[in-house]
Image (spheres, rainbow, N blue to C red):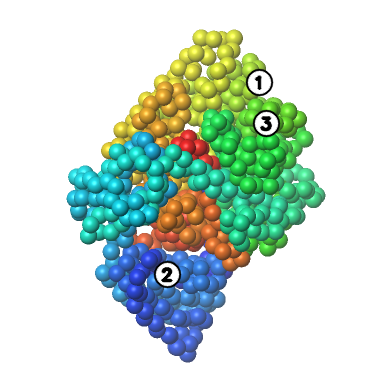
């Protein structure tokens, strides 16, 4: 999202750097160790060079380590050099140049004989529903494949691979193994004689249930201000209450201590941001509204489980309560709550920086985008919590109304970090799409004419966003406003205008979806992403394509929309060039090193479960990605390392899109 650049500039100054190549699953690494005498390399306080060379080395990068002990936390690392930050700041340029030249020789040796495709058979490592298309994608020049039962290795299906097609986004030659006809529940793998076998996967009627639960548990793990414990299934994944001390920053226009409980840590950092909370929480509430029948049976085993309220609403409420606290007495909402600078890579309970409510720095101190996002979430919450807690629903609706009134008075108060504040910005030049969404949700909840009229006066400006799916992001919410209006079922006094708006929204969404389906089918990896989509958070964009197709399916049911959405889910869960599940602890080969402070603090067993990685990013906005070979195709610009904040960070907005997609495909 581009909001962490200042964080990492700081980290670079402070912390270790190293150069590495990484490899995984190297069967018999050959180890070369060279110790550089300290007398010669006096500048470099730690100067150990280790190279483990094997045929699977396939990527390398230059980046800083933010932890202090990279070898311990990157056990797959193959070739590395550790340099102290003090050295980097004080060392003579000639010595630095000599060291870097030496490293390049080392890297060339490591890269020699590299294979580009370690896992040529790519499957959804979670699985495939009983009916519907089932494809594995294969980047190997062979002809035949088998599907075998995991329990006894019996071949239950044999078939021919399709003709190879070149995928321009990865450079891979890709063939498809179609085993759609296999409709017997069980655990399987794909085997190709002479090539090997895929990761295991399930075929069944409820294959996505556990992934959905884990993705929701991902939100629970982000809770701020409270102790968190993921329970016996994930021993050791817990932390004491964090961020107990809150204050009003002078930029908020007020001062003093503040209650600091509630909300989710936004991403790999510990900030809480109203704007990103808006789309994340709104998407979770929609998940409940649209797929509630499917997910109400699922217990997430969170502290509130069993209280009579569905767990997805229990989890969303944790964040809504915090959003409500961000509303000032005049109705406006402050933009964010975070420390003034990002903390280091430490556990949440060890971050003792005051958590500050931060405003714009001048009157009216609150921002229009944050306030409109509060109106959105408050309006949806008023509907969703009514059956379970009418008092809370009324409180949410009142907050939404007051927020709306504030945005009418101050529609254009945008946000930028005031001087001295260096955490995430989530700033946008305009808050008009937030206001459209807020008006539509308030109309859907209250049926009051003023909200309908605002929508009718403004919606046409946003219709083009439906023509270039997926369209929505934390800063572009027009499609969300359009869709909720079409789903509202409400009729206003101007029935003709209402009907015209709804018809246009449905028609353009369905037309957009047809284009996405066509492109997805033609893509050798069966993913909707275009080359231009491989930007910061590309995995979130894949999930949003899925969401777009599922919305179209609500307006005009069509199996190709559901299948196309599922193709994007398959991509995220392992059917991609890396054969990597981009959700931690999901599948047999998930990514391991999210840019996520709790995971990397050294106080936890490893990657916290259920978290979606940002994914490949052709814009290379961090050191790791910038150091990759220049000719890499866009979908290949990715390294599984915590240092890659522009490619491997987790974030609540794309996490919510994943939840929606999983629920839709359950
Ligand atoms: Zn916290």
> 631 above or below 364?
below
Q: Which residue is mark 2?
A: 77
Q: CA distance from mark 3 to mark 2?
A: 48 Å
Q: Is residue 553 above or below residue 313?
A: above
Q: Position of residue 539 (x, y in %)?
A: 44, 46
Name the spot of residue 189 as percent of width and height, x first. 34, 52
Secondary structure of residue under mark 3: loop
Give the crowd class for mark 2: few <14, some 14-19, many >=20 residues within 10 Å: many
Q: In terms of image quadrants, where is residue 238?
A: bottom right
Q: Is mark 3 within 8 Å of ligand 1?
A: no
Residue 7 on image: x %, y %: 56, 58
Residue at 28% from the left image edge and 67% from the top image edge: 114
Left or right side of 145 for 375: right
Closer to the chain start, of discs 3 and 1, is: 3
Q: Secondary structure at mark 2?
A: strand
Residue at (74% x, 55% y) in the render: 244
Give the mark nearer the N terminus: 3 vs 2: 2
First reached walking from the N terminus: tag 1 or tag 2: 2
**Residues at discs 1 and 2 in contact (Cβ within 8 Å):** no
Instruction: State left or right for residue 168 relative to residue 281.
Output: left
Closest to the observer, 304 or 272: 304
Please tell me the numbered disc located at residue 446.
Answer: 1
Disc 3 residue crowd, few under 14, some 14–19, many 20+, Cα 10 Å = many
In the picture of the structure, the residue carrying the numbered disc 3 is: 385
**Residue 431 can be seen in this image:** no
Mark 1 neighbour class, 10 Å CA radius: few under 14, some 14 to 19, many 20 or more: some
């Amino acid at each position: 999202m581009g909001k962490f650049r200042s964080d990492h500039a700081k980290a670079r100054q402070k912390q270790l750097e190293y150069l590495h190549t990484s490899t995984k699953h190297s069967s018999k690494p050959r180890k070369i160790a060279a110790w550089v005498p300290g007398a010669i390399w006096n500048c470099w306080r730690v100067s150990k060079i280790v190279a483990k060379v094997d045929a699977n080395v396939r990527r390398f990068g230059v980046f800083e380590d933010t932890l202090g002990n990279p070898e311990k936390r990157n056990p797959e690392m193959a070739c590395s050099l550790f340099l102290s930050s003090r050295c980097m700041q004080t060392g003579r340029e000639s010595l630095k140049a000599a060291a870097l030249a030496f490293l390049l020789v080392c890297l060339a040796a490591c890269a020699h004989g590299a294979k580009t495709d370690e896992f040529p058979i790519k499957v959804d490592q979670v699985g495939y529903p009983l009916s519907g298309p089932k494809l594995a994608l294969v980047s190997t020049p062979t002809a035949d494949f088998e599907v075998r039962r995991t329990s006894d290795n019996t071949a239950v299906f044999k078939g021919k691979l399709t003709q190879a097609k070149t995928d321009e986004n990865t450079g891979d030659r890709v063939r498809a193994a179609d085993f759609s006809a296999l409709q017997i529940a069980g655990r399987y793998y794909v085997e190709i004689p002479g090539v090997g076998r895929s990761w295991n996967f399930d075929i069944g009627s409820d294959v996505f249930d556990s992934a959905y639960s884990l993705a929701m548990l991902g939100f629970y793990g982000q809770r701020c201000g409270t102790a968190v414990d993921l329970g016996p299934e994930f021993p050791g994944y817990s932390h004491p209450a964090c961020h107990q001390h809150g204050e009003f920053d002078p930029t908020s226009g007020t001062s003093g201590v503040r209650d600091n409980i509630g909300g989710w840590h936004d991403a790999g950092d510990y900030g809480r941001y109203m704007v990103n909370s808006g789309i994340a929480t709104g998407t979770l509430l929609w998940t409940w509204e649209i797929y509630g029948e499917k997910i109400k049976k699922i217990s997430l085993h969170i502290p509130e489980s069993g209280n009579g309220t569905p767990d997805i609403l229990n989890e969303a409420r944790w964040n809504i309560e915090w959003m409500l606290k961000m509303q000032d007495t005049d109705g406006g909402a402050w933009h964010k709550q975070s420390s003034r600078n990002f903390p280091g890579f430490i556990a949440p309970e060890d971050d003792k920086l005051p958590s500050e409510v931060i405003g714009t720095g001048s009157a009216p101190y609150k921002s229009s985008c944050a306030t409109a996002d509060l109106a959105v979430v408050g309006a949806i919450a008023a509907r969703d919590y009514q059956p379970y807690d009418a008092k809370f629903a009324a409180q949410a609706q009142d907050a939404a109304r007051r927020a709306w009134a504030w945005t009418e008075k101050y529609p254009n108060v945008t946000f930028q970090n005031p001087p001295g504040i260096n955490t995430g910005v989530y700033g946008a030049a305009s808050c008009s799409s937030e206001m459209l969404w807020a008006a539509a949700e308030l109309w859907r909840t209250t049926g009051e004419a003023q909200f309908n009229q605002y929508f009718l006066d403004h919606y046409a400006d946003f219709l083009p966003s439906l023509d270039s799916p997926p369209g929505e992001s934390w800063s572009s919410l027009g499609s969300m406003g359009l869709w909720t209006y079409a789903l509202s079922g409400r009729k206003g006094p101007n029935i003709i205008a209402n009907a015209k708006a709804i018809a246009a929204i449905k028609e353009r969404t369905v037309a957009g979806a047809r284009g996405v389906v066509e492109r997805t089918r033609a893509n050798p990896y069966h993913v909707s992403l275009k080359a231009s989509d491989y930007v910061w958070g590309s995995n979130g964009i894949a999930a949003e394509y899925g969401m777009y197709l599922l919305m179209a399916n609500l307006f005009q049911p069509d199996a190709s929309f559901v299948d196309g959405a599922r193709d994007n889910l398959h991509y995220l869960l392992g059917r991609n060039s890396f054969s990597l599940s981009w959700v931690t602890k999901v599948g047999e080969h998930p990514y391991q090193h999210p840019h996520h402070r709790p995971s990397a603090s050294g106080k936890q067993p490893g990657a916290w479960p259920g978290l979606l990685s940002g994914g490949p990013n052709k814009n290379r906005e961090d050191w790791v990605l910038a150091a990759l070979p220049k000719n890499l195709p866009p979908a290949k610009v990715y390294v599984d390392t915590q240092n890659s904040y522009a490619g491997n960070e987790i974030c609540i907005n794309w996490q919510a899109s994943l939840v929606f997609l999983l629920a839709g495909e359950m």
